[in-house]
Amino acid sequence: MIELSPSLLSANFANLKDDIHMLEKAGVNWLHLDVMDGMFVPNITFGPVVIKDIRKISNMFFDVHLMIEDPARYVDAFKKAGADMYTVHYEACRHLHRTIQKIKDSGMKAGVSINPHTPVEHLKYIINDLDLVLIMSVNPGFGGQKFIEKTYDKVQELRALIDSTGASAVIEVDGGVNHTNAGKLVELGADVLVAGSAVFGAESPAESAVTFMEIMNESFASRRG
Ligand code: DX5
Ligand code: ZN
């Protein structure tokens, strides 16, 4: 599978319904929802209340990225609100293994995100428990930042770790992703790309999303040989 997960963070929040339906019409399956608490990251966004309401108007796969301290506290609230994937930060969990089990027990898929400074090898003993690993290619907190080039190495390392352990986690990359770096990321092993400003900042977000999906599918085909 290969998916584009547009980040709602760069959308106009007074116009969410139309924006979401526009993405669905363009053939996008995933929606990336950035939850921030003003503690783990400097910024504050939205929580389960907002997700519950947009769940009513969309059947997309809700890919929820928790940039909050101790995210185990909110597993049940986000499950109830309609989240499909619950991705926590490695750096925000003291008992990550337990948190992952809690997410899975709730019925959601479990993801772990690593900040730019966190090595891929820290995931060695939990990789087989994960549905997704999110590699941050900017420091979390804001849309529209510049892509960190070291990310390419991390995608390759993670691809090797997953392939060598027989794990089934998909690789997602988030931050500064655009039409220029998307192809290389997929070729090196990424399965899901998050894009905020490169979709919602475009003159036509729908056209930008379609272009992303074309680039990604082409690179995926060449990765498969
Ligand atoms: C950043 C968020 C991202 C953000 C990406 O902390 O996790 O999902 O919305 O935005 P762009 O694609 O503009 O870098
Ligand atoms: Zn995100």
Image (cartoon, grey):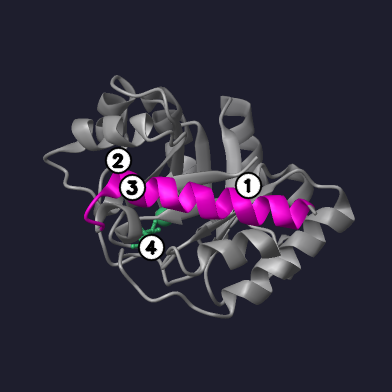
Q: Nearer the viewer, mark 2 or mark 4?
A: 2
Residue under label 2: 47
Residue 206 x/y as whole percent: 31, 43
Residue 146 x/y as whole percent: 38, 76
Report helix, strand or loop for mark 1.
strand
**Separation of residues labelled 2 and 4 (CA atoms):** 14 Å
**Span highlighted in magenta in the image:** 202-224
Which residue shows up at 74% across the image and 43% down it?
129
Report helix, strand or loop for mark 4.
loop
Q: In which quarter of the image is the N terminus?
A: top right
- Can you say whether 38 is above or below 16 in the image? below
Residue under label 3: 207
Whichever of callouts 4 and 1 sits on the residue coming sooner in the sequence is 4
Residue under label 1: 132
Report helix, strand or loop for mark 2.
loop
Side (left or right) of 204 relative to 190: left
Whichever of callouts 3 and 4 sits on the residue coming sooner in the sequence is 4
Q: Is residue 119 visible?
A: no
Whichever of callouts 1 and 2 sits on the residue coming sooner in the sequence is 2
